[in-house]
Amino acid sequence: MIAIILGTRPEIIKMSPIIRACEALGEDYFTLHTGQHYSYEMDRTFFEDLELPQPEYNLDVGSGTHAEQTGKIMTGIEKVLLEKKPGVVLVQGDTNTVLAGALAASKLHIKVGHVEAGLRSFDRRMPEEINRIVADHISDMLFPPTETAKKNLIGEGILEEKIFVTGNTVVDAVEQNLAIAQRKGDLLQQLGLTAKGFFLVTAHRAENVDNKQRLEGILQGLEAIRNEFSLPIVFPMHPRTAKMVQAFGLSLDGICITKPLGYLDFLQLEANARLVLTDSGGLQEESCILGVPCVTLRDNTERPETVEVGANVLAGATSDVILNCVREKLEQHRVWTNPFGDGRAGKRIIKEIFKCF
Ligand code: UD1
Ligand code: UDP
C-alpha cells in the first residue's frame, strides 16, 4: 500500500497526477493531508478543481514555527503509519510536510519515495533547501525531474540505483488541466484582461515577503513596470504576503490584487500572461512549460533548467534590476524546449514503485 502525503497548495497540484495514476492502475493507496495549508483557497479549492478524492486523514496541524509545525506533523503521521502500515510513503517537493513525512516514515523503517528529488538552490538559508537535502538523504527511491537534479544527488553520494529520472509531475498537471481551464475559465473576462495584455505576479517566499526591504523592492519594481508598459498587473496574493504587506504598512496602489486563485483560474491567467514575475518554484516551471517568459524575484533558483533554455531570468528583489529583466525578456522570442518531461511522470513513478517493492 502507498501512503501519499501532502499538505500545501503545490503538493496537492503536483501529487494529483500520482493520485490519478494510482486510481487508473488500481493501486492500493491512501492520502494523508497534514493541514499545513488549510484556508479554502489554499487547500479545498484544489481538490474541487482537480476532482480529487477527499484525503482519508487530515491532521489539521495549521501554521506555526518550523519546529512546531514539523513536530506536530511527525507525531500525527507516525500514528497513521503505525495503524495503516503502508509499504511506501510518498512525499513531494520541499515543504515542512515533506521533511516531517519522510522522517516519520524512515524512523519506522517504511520505504520513502521523494518526488521532485535532487533540486538544489545551494542556499542553505532557505528552509526549503534544508527540507530537500534531508528528505533526499533518507529516501529509498528518488524521483528527480531532470538529469541536472540527478547529478546533484550523485554529487552528494546518493546511490544511482535508488534514482529514477521521471520528469516533473507538474507537466502532467498542466496537460491534464490546461484545456479545461481555457474552456471553463472566465476570469480573464471578469478582470477585463486580454490575452498577452497583462503581467501576472506571485510572491510568497519567506526571504522575500518577511523582509521589508525586499518586499518593498519588489513592489517598487511592479510600479516601475506599470509606468513603463501601462498594462494591468495581476497579483493573486498568498496569505503570508497579505499579512506582511499589512504589517509593514506597504501600498498596493495600482496593482490588481486578488485572493489566491483556484488552479483552473490560475492556469488560464498564467497561459495568457505577457510575462510572469514570481518567486514560486512551481510558477518558474509552469511558465516555462506554457511558453510564457518568467522573471524570477530571487537571487538563485533550484530550477536552473528554466534559465538555461531561455525561459527564465533571475532578477532578485531590486526595482531597477526587475525592470531591466522584464525589458530583456520581452525582447526575446518565446520559443524554447520544455525541460521537465513528457507529462507521464505520475504513471512512471507509480510503475517504478510497483517494480521495486
Ligand atoms: C509553504 C512552504 C513553501 C511553499 C509554500 C507553498 C515550508 C517551510 N514552506 O510556505 O516552501 O513554497 O508553502 O505555498 O514548508 N496561511 C494562511 N492559510 C493557509 C496557509 C498559510 O493564512 O492555508 C498563512 C499563515 O499566516 C501562515 C503563513 O501563511 O503563518 C505561512 O504559511 P506556512 O505554511 O508556514 O508557509 P508558506 O509561506 O505557505
Ligand atoms: N497557484 C494557484 N493559484 C494561485 C497561485 C499559484 O493555483 O493563486 C498554483 C500554481 O499554478 C502552481 C502552484 O500553485 O502550480 C505553486 O504553488 P506556490 O507558488 O504556492 O508554491 P511553490 O511552487 O513555490 O512551492
Image (cartoon, rainbow, N blue to C red):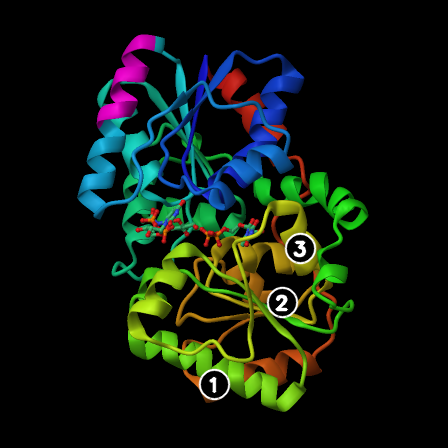
For label 1, the residue is 321
What amino acid does circle 2 point to? Ala
Q: Where is residue 88, by image quadrant?
A: top left
Separation of marks 3 and 1 at Cα, in angstroms = 25 Å
Is the C terminus in the top left, top right, bottom left or bottom right quadrant? Answer: top left
Mark before the other along the chain sequence, 1 or 2: 2
Q: Nearer the viewer, residue 280 or 108?
A: 280
Label 3 Cα neighbours within 10 Å, binned few <14 / some 14-19 / many ≥20: many
Label 1 Cα neighbours within 10 Å, binned few <14 / some 14-19 / many ≥20: some
For label 2, the residue is 311
C-beta proximity under 8 Å, tags 3 and 1 = no
Q: Secondary structure at mark 1?
A: helix
Above-or-below relation of 284 to 162:
below
Residue at image point 68% right, 59% down: 269
Q: Does the image show residue 144?
A: no
- Magenta stretch bounds: 75-83
Separation of marks 1 and 2 at Cα, in angstroms = 17 Å
Above-or-below relation of 82 to 44:
above
Residue 289: numbered disc: 3
What amino acid does circle 1 point to? Val
Instruction: Give the overall secondary structure of the magenta segment.
Output: helix
Q: Where is residue 109, by image quadrant?
A: top left
Q: Secondary structure at mark 3?
A: helix
